[in-house]
Amino acid sequence: MSASTRIPVIAQPFVSDRAKRTLDQVEQFVEKECIPSEAIFRAQLGTGSQRWSTYPAIMETLKQKAREQGLWNMFLPKNHFAQGAGFSNLEYGLMAEYLGKSTIASEATNNAAPDTGNMEVLAKYGNEQQKKQWLEPLLEGKIRSAFLMTEPEVASSDATNIQLDIKREGDEWVLNGSKWWSSGAGDPRCAIYLVMGKTDPTNPDPYKQQSVILVPAHNTPGITVHRMLTVYGYDDAPHGHGHITFKNVRVPVSNIVLGEGRGFEIIQGRLGPGRIHHAMRTIGAAEKALEWMIARINDERKKPFGQSLSSHGVILEWVAKSRIEIDAARLIVLNAAIKIDQGDAKSALKEIAQAKVMVPSMACGVIDRAVQAYGAMGVCQDTPLAYMWAWVRTLRIADGPDEVHLLQMGRRENKSRKEEVRRKLKWQAEETEKLLGVTAGGRSRL
Ligand SMILES: Cc1cc2nc3c(=O)[nH]c(=O)nc-3n(C[C@H](O)[C@H](O)[C@H](O)COP(=O)(O)OP(=O)(O)OC[C@H]3O[C@@H](n4cnc5c(N)ncnc54)[C@H](O)[C@@H]3O)c2cc1C
């Protein structure tokens, strides 16, 4: 059964024939080209310090193959951007699931974070010169980029806390401060940082204090990349998550994106579709974990106490629960994508937040069951499960922790529904009392 025949019934009316054909091509490309090449990528990367200065040649080979098949820049949705491959968020969402099954497929098709979000920023808010200088080579896959918002000294899940100082001096912006978790900053091809900081720290509106400035990553005096942070011990080379300081870093005033005090607008615009791209890929990771679980429980060589694991009810229950959870989560993600397609990311805030919170927790649970089915082998490098778990676990924190999304969602749900539900329940209680022929006085519980 090919990928296009597995599209959930609810989503089918929204998927074009062209997207179905591309979806099948993406599946074949990921399963037959990318997954077998992952070991080559790791071998070419090696183990020494050159991992941060060279780049595995296999990636360029894969990129070439992807471009030949038109599998390139599928993430830019057709109703908002002219530069992409002409698919909707839903159609790309179905494809992203397959990209999420491989550690290298997203980059091979130029659909990798954080470039996707950064390209959206430049396409949506950049001026013509910024688009020419930075968006064009990013769309071509010639350079990579990083988005620098999070800071080590402050609780960055509340972006009003961001401190990096940006002052205007003549025709230049001068940047001072530190950033960490700058994903992609380790890559030798990372040429541009999108840096968020404060241009107007005393503005009474805390949402107007921030701006985003474009800072060339190479040959800009005052930038120090101190170290790459590890994720549960993985350094994610050559991509990396940088800890970077800025000391009197100077760039021309024309490097501001959109305008002074527009930083919040930009991060909100950036994180909408990007949040569901992660969710879509994570569904693919969960599917992959389930595939590995099924392979293990049917392994003829490994029969504890003389029985195949697949003959145990508890293990089959893990398979069934995983199937239910993945399928349910996929519907949540696709629903969010359809909602964005029918309006924009702002009109789908609730649906995006549902997907952002639900999918990583679901996938962590599925991967954990697969790890358990493998025993000790599940926690080491001999299956993709350990790395997948580490990656998926971070998604409960990256792009804003679960609690912040849940708080906002809870507030919105409560605010928008409290009057209506109280009124309705009161009315129903009164109707019931009337029907019972009892007077209402003093009997209402609301
Ligand atoms: C793998 C990875 C990649 C990342 N990539 C990038 C990147 O490319 N660029 C970038 O700028 N940042 C990046 N980040 C950083 C990420 O966006 C932040 O870590 C995240 O926004 C949380 O900020 P913080 O770490 O400062 O946590 P804090 O703000 O200190 O929050 C700590 C904890 O407090 C709790 N909390 C916070 N608010 C509330 C609340 N309202 N109610 C209840 N509890 C709450 C949550 O449990 C939260 O995890 C990345 C992080 C990871 C792990």
Image (cartoon, rainbow, N blue to C red):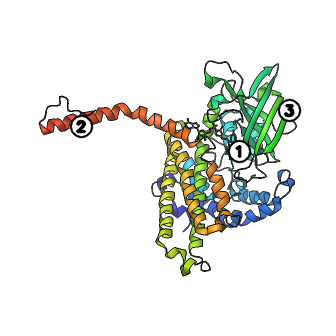
Can you tell which mark lies on residue 222?
3
Report the amino acid beneath label 1: Asp
Indicate the secondary structure of the residue bearing disc 3: loop
Q: Can residue 348 be seen in this view?
A: no
Residue 435, image x, y percentages: 14, 38
Q: Which of marks 2 and 3 is nearer the N terminus?
A: 3
Q: Residue at x 68, y 28 (%)?
A: 258
Find disc 2 in the rendering and name its residue: 428
- For ligand 1, which image quadrant applies? top right
Can you say whether 34 is above or below 147 in the image? below
Q: Residue at x 75, y 42 (%)?
A: 145
Query: Are the residues flagged by discs 1 and 2 in contact, CB closer than 8 Å?
Result: no
Give the spatial CA distance, label 1 vs label 2.
53 Å
| Depth order, front residue of 83/365 | 365
Find disc 1 in the rendering and name its residue: 115
Give the spatial CA distance, label 1 vs label 3.
24 Å
